[in-house]
Image (cartoon, rainbow, N blue to C red):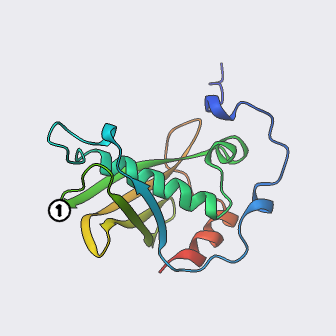
Amino acid sequence: MTKPSFVPHCARRAVSHDLTKDMASDTPADPFRFDIRVYYEDTDTGGVVYYANYLKFFERARTEWLRRLGVNQSEYAVQEQRLFVVKKVEIQYRKPAVLDDLLTLHSTITRIGRASLTFRQHAQRGDHVLCDSTIEVCCIDANTFRPAPFPAELRTLLEKTRT
């Protein structure tokens, strides 16, 4: 008996176009910037951003970075049978963010492996770095959940963005 293919709930619609068609052809190596506002739900009882929420903020920034490159993760899961999962996180908190702060998240790739990427990400308020991290993301096969190499087209695209 074969194991059924994993298809995320949000991706169970028919996908009929070529993934690489929508990928950006010009991908500068500049750090990707993504702004996010701190909401009440992001804070603890002291009014400070709860420490784990920075991981959510960084996840959103990586997802938007992929979108800018033309990669929709739900379509990618269906078409390429590849998922992205966080393997390792190193994070340092420097200063607190509070309700209504506008944070700018910066994301750059520092290493590309056969089946993994390492990102350097930090959150800033104005000129002040509040939190910085190194996050390793692994590419896995959607059916086996084992590491899988990046498809050639994606690898080429990633190499263009590396700083």
Query: Does residue 53 lie above or below 128 as drawn?
Result: above
The foreground one among 22 and 101 is 101
Residue 157 placed where, x, y %? 64, 70
Q: Quadrant of residue 47?
A: top left
Residue 99 placed where, x, y %? 28, 48
The crowding category of the residue bearing disc 1, from other C-alpha atoms within 10 Å (few below 14, some 14 to 19, many at least 20), is: few
Q: Amino acid at mark 1?
A: Lys
Q: Quadrant of residue 53?
A: top left
Residue that carries the numbered disc 1 in the rendered image? 95
Residue at point 81%, 35% (across, down): 14
In this view, which residue lies farthest toward the top?
1
Residue 27 shown left or right of residue 104 in the figure: right
Residue at point 65%, 59% (across, down): 151
Query: Does residue 145 lie above or below 119 as drawn?
Result: above
Label 1 SS = loop
Residue 101 placed where, x, y %? 32, 57
Q: Is residue 150 visible?
A: no
